[in-house]
Amino acid sequence: MANKKQEAPKESKPYDGLVKALFGEQSEEVISSLIAEVHRPEGLTDDELNVELNRTTLSIDIGRHIIYKEDSVTLNLEAQSDADDDLLPRMNEYSLNLYRKYKRPVLSIALLLFKGEVPENPFQIICGGEVRSAFYPIIICMWEKDPYQVVEGHQRCLYPFLPVMKEPTVELLTRAVREMDEHDSRPQFRRHLAWFQTMLGRTTTISQEDKQMIREVLKMQYQGYDLFREDPVIGGMILEGEIKGEIKGKIEGLQEAILGIVGARFSAQVVAQVQQTIASIQDMQQLRTFLHQLALISDEEEVYALLTQYLSLQDKMKSRIEGEIEGIQESILDIVSDRFSSQIVDQVQQSIAPVQDVQQLRKFLRQLARTSDEEEVPALLTQCFQIR
């Protein structure tokens, strides 16, 4: 049996999730924009159009009941952002299972997001020198798609994909974002622009210079992060980053004040020792106390004694923090091991191993405790640790 969907490369998860979100919001428009011969069956509700497989065995990306060239068929679309040798065998397995469940022909589409190796099509099983089985999916390489046709045709549902298409210019991308701003609702524009920037960050069809120009346009014309502050998820992540930036600025200010006092009173050797010691102190209260104590000292020997005291304190704190980090990491792995597959356990273990921020680990642990679907875990890793 082919590998389960969740065994695909971990780097693909944020982008696969983006595609699912787009299809969930504008499924009919996206499907018909990608495949001209497709339209919606008449008289069926959205719930009746959705198709699924048992998620304990197989997990498809997009499944819909559609009309293709006047035939009633099941569409299975798989989004892929990284090379995966198992893609077509896996899709072949999905196709057979969908056919058995819904008793309709299956139209299989592989949507390749980023420029790279294209799987050989068709996928064949050869035995004794003869083809015993052949699977013919439609393969769409987004980097070959003409972005000008998309914009000229006002296919706005595909605008978040424009950065990965064939050499879009800064002018074209700017025009597309302006059009989204004019026609989307405010919540839609926030989401679409966030997805647009996600694709912009990964694509190789745009030069770094053009990427930077686009980012500057977005910053100047759409208030930089101001637009995203309104989104509860994106805005929360930005606020968290700003708080960290403010704390970092205060710490640097206290460190500069300490070095100012030492530089005015003592030798260069003492200044170097103090600078080395306080560089590792990230606790504002400790730095304030050190500054107050330093202001009362006029003898270099007393400075060295103060440094020894703080070095000893730092060693104790470092030991305590290391123990706390190890404890949280163990708790995380206990939860993941009890709930999810070995692939997810490995991914989480690799992701949290280098993390030395206690607050980040605590936040991840709290959110992980509320998660029961392992497909949510990679996105949670990205949100908490900015893993791409």
Image: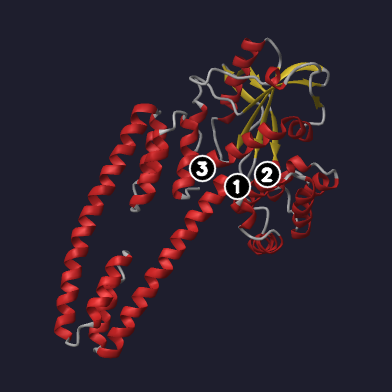
Left/right of residue 291 with respect to residue 179 in the rendered view: left
Q: Compare residues 1 and 35 and report the one nearer the observer.
A: 35
Q: Is residue 62 above or below residue 308?
A: above
Q: Residue furthest right?
A: 152
Contact? badges 2 and 1 (CB < 8 Å): yes
Q: Which residue is mark 1?
A: 231
Q: Which residue is mark 2?
A: 187
Q: Is residue 151 above or below residue 124?
A: below
Residue 119 seen in render: no
Q: Residues within 10 Å of mark 2 (few under 14, many from 20)?
A: few
Q: Is residue 67 above or below residue 365?
A: above
Distance between the alpha carbons at the discs numbered 1 and 3? 24 Å
Distance between the alpha carbons at the discs numbered 3 and 2? 27 Å
Give the x, y percent position of residue 338: 34, 27
Give the x, y percent position of residue 1: 49, 19
Contact? badges 3 and 2 (CB < 8 Å): no
Left/right of residue 241 with respect to residue 308 in the rendered view: right
Left/right of residue 286 with respect to residue 43 in the rendered view: left
